[in-house]
Amino acid sequence: MNAQPIVVVAGGAGYVGSVLVPRLLESGYRVRVLDSLVFGLRGLEPVLDRIEVVEEDIRSVPGSVLRGADALVNLAALSNDPTANFRPQLCWDVNAEGALRLAKLCIDEGISRYVYASSSSIYDTRDPSTAPEACREEDPIRPIGPYSSSKYEAETRILPLASERFAPVALRKGTLYGFSPRMRFDLVVNTFVRGAMRDGTISLHNGGGMWRPLLSVEDAAAAYIRCLEAPAEAIRGEAFNVVHCNESIANVAAELRAACEALGRALCVESTPSPSPVRNYCASERKAQRVLGLESAITIRESVDKMLHVLPEAGFTDFDNPWYSNIAWMERTDEEAPPS
């Protein structure tokens, strides 16, 4: 890469992008954000004078927008099951077809590195009867539902494009948690924090026995940067699980309760029936540790403590505002554009 390489971040104004973009600037990169701006630019306000912003949809953006860049990180997506189920065709068009289109534009423009935001939800079996084994990247995959199917389809079509001149890599991240300037409260840990701060109550479906791989948004940002800086031969055509821990939802609730008690807050945990279908899966992070040297650092407890302190200071107290939920915002705006 050049001395001060240019990284295009598609979907860079979203939850992850609003953490990643400042980290890229701190690491010496120049940043060009490509985003449809469904959620606006609030998450990037502190760095707007230091970045380029291009308002475009990845389904139709011209290749000229990528010209001169050294790498592309693709975060643009309908990024959870509810939004994908709400508009399954849009999910496919953005998450699979749009992601593949960006990869081909990178090849055409001579961009050598493409980091694709995949998801560990591709391992979900929807079987809540037992605690699942942690899936490895080479294990058989049969994704269920529009979201995970679109993510896996993108992987199967992008990674084989790898060549000496093009190094695509897919990061299968766990469910994210933590503070971002483009805050989301529709992720399990963050949802619990919202409940604790709003009225001191959280809902635990059927005792919280289902499992998830989890990862802080800050560690996710670090993983993207690591993929930009790793030797091309280490990441070319590869997929990596990126996970801090695998936890039952009941254990997540226990972490939140401990954090609330330490601050003198009361927390009521209500048991409610599970919605259908129940998601239940785990993922192994060993390959990313071995090949990339990735060691996620931020625990659920540390992230919860930070959110309990920072959210009021940052003015994120209107907890029912649809801006904090991808599906609520999509239902409100009903726009044919991809949230990120």
Image (tube, rainbow, N blue to C red):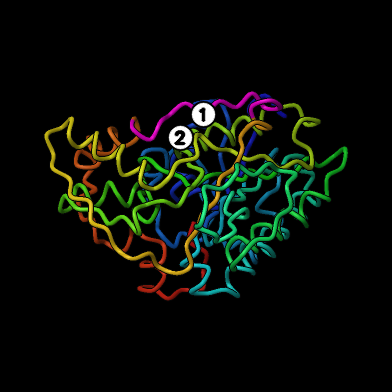
Residue underneath mark 1? 296
Secondary structure under badge 2?
A: helix
Kind of residue sitting beneath label 2 = Glu
Q: Which mark is residue 218?
A: 2
* Residue extent of the magenta highlight: 289-301
Choose between 256 and 208: the one closer to the eye.
208
Residue at (70% x, 55% y) in the render: 141
Residue at (61% x, 34% y) in the render: 285
Residue 175 seen anywhere in this rendered image of the structure: yes
Residue at (48% x, 74% y) in the render: 86
Q: Which mark is residue 157?
A: none
* x and y, in percent, of residue 242 in the image: 58, 38
Choose between 339 and 36: the one closer to the eye.
339
Residue at (29% x, 33% y) in the render: 306
* x and y, in percent, of residue 246 in the image: 50, 40
Mark 2 Cα-neighbour bin, 10 Å: few <14, some 14–19, many ≥20: many
Q: Alpha carbon of mark 2 to alpha carbon of mark 1: how far?
A: 9 Å
Q: From the viewer's perspective, is 165 left or right of 254? A: right
Residue 61 seen anywhere in this rendered image of the structure: no
Q: From the viewer's perspective, is 70 left or right of 186? A: right
Assess whether mark 1 and mark 2 are in contact (beta carbons under 8 angstroms). no
Q: Is residue 308 above or below residue 119?
A: above
